[in-house]
């Protein structure tokens, strides 16, 4: 199996102009799949951040293969060797174990705070939106990938701070993503004829959170939205307005037909069918294998403003069939 750190190539932050807000792309409730968190929790494929010695060694300068083809080893990695830097874009500049904000999981004493300042090539400032990635090493935890016929799903609790504490810009701020494998039929032509073969490709369905800053693009008040990547036509679009901050539970599940099912609910309770947002063949592909999950943290990359502070707790991987 190829190292996920080598093949992972997540999409960039979503420009606002590319997003569609029409509802025609949202799947009906009849295609909900199953609720994320159903079945068995996979041991070692998550983190509760309860270890008071949880730390992350950044190993700066970070990688930026996406923009300048530079992979700067050794990669950043957490002390428990579950989290690591993305070779493509590098990890967020600050990763700290913190006390969960009020209203979090009952009994939890630890959560992970993520924020970033220099989200582009180390030492360069562009003033444009850019992102860093924090990847979870599912492959090492389970010894490979998970066929979607086993119905994998991922769930995480995410704390959304009050809107006045978000980075003041209208753009994507956070992403909860999965890495999945698909195979496409391609044709190789030569003087002796043509041959069809299957080519493996990796894709990255996910739930983004976009901030809509007051006064920008005519917005009357600060607000946020869930953006999905992407629908059956490989289009990213706004699926739901976020009307309250605080803790949210996000989830993605994968069914044997190759669909990804997106869920979100305010609070920290388990997800239910009523929390279904949409179901799609993400980015126009049929998922075949689940690789891992990861997080994006984005900012305007002006060298001065930190991103919004994002806090996550208890990310976990589940399978319906062992």
Image: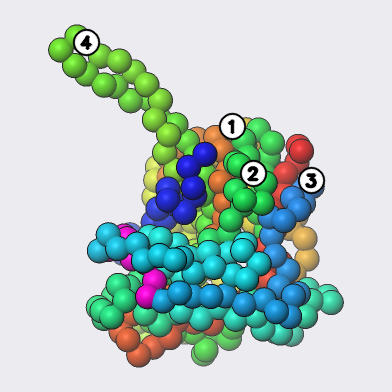
Q: Residue 257 carries which label?
A: 1
Q: Quadrant of residue 130?
A: bottom left
Q: Residues within 10 Å of mark 3 (few under 14, many from 20)?
A: some
Q: Mark 3 points at which residue?
A: 39
Comes first in the chain, label 4 or label 1: 4
> Could you tell me which residue is drawn at 46 percent across and 79 percent down?
93
Secondary element at image label 4 = strand
Q: Give the range drawn in magenta.
A: 61-67
Secondary element at image label 2 = loop
Q: Nearer the viewer, residue 135 or 183?
A: 135
Q: How crowded is mark 1: few (under 14 residues within 10 Å), some or many (20 or more)?
A: few
Q: In which quarter of the image is residue 20?
A: bottom left
> Could you tell me which residue is drawn at 28 percent across and 80 percent down?
123
Q: Mark 2 points at which residue?
A: 143
> Could you tell me which residue is drawn at 33 percent across and 80 percent down?
301
Disc 1 versus disc 3: nearer the observer: 3
The scheme the figure's colours follow is: rainbow
Q: How crowded is mark 2: few (under 14 residues within 10 Å), some or many (20 or more)?
A: few
Q: Name the residue under label 4.
A: 193
Instruction: Give coordinates of residue 161: x percent, y percent.
Output: 59, 83
Disc 3 versus disc 2: nearer the observer: 2
Q: Is residue 173 above or below residue 37?
A: below
Q: How crowded is mark 4: few (under 14 residues within 10 Å), some or many (20 or more)?
A: few
């Amino acid at each position: 199996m190829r190292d996920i750190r080598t093949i992972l190539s997540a999409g960039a932050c979503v420009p606002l102009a590319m997003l569609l807000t029409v509802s025609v792309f949202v799947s009906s409730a009849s295609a909900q799949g199953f609720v994320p968190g159903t079945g068995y929790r996979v041991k070692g494929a998550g983190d509760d951040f309860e270890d008071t010695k949880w730390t992350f060694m950044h190993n700066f300068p970070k990688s930026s293969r996406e923009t300048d083809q530079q992979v700067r080893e050794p990669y950043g990695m957490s002390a428990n060797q579950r989290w690591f830097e993305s070779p493509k874009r590098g990890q967020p500049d600050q990763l700290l174990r913190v006390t969960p904000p009020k209203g979090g999981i009952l009994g939890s004493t630890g959560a992970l705070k993520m924020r970033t300042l220099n989200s582009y090539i180390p030492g360069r400032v562009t003033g444009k939106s850019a992102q860093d990635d924090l990847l979870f090493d599912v492959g090492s935890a389970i010894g490979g990938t998970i066929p979607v016929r086993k119905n994998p799903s991922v769930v995480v609790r995410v704390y959304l701070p009050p809107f006045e504490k978000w980075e003041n810009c209208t753009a994507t701020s956070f992403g909860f993503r999965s890495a999945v494998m698909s195979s496409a039929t391609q044709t190789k032509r030569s003087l002796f004829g043509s041959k069809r073969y299957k080519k493996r490709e990796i894709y990255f369905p996910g739930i983004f959170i976009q901030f809509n800053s007051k006064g920008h693009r005519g917005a009357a008040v600060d607000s946020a939205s869930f953006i999905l990547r992407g629908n059956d036509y490989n289009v990213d679009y706004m699926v739901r307005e976020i009307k309250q901050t605080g803790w949210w539970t996000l989830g993605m599940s994968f069914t044997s037909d190759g669909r990804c099912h997106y869920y979100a609910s305010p609070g920290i309770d388990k997800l239910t069918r009523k929390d279904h947002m949409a179901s799609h063949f993400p980015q126009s592909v049929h998922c075949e294998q689940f690789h891992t999950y990861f997080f994006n943290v984005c900012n305007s990359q002006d060298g001065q403003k930190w991103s919004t502070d994002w806090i996550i707790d208890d990310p976990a991987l589940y399978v319906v069939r062992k």
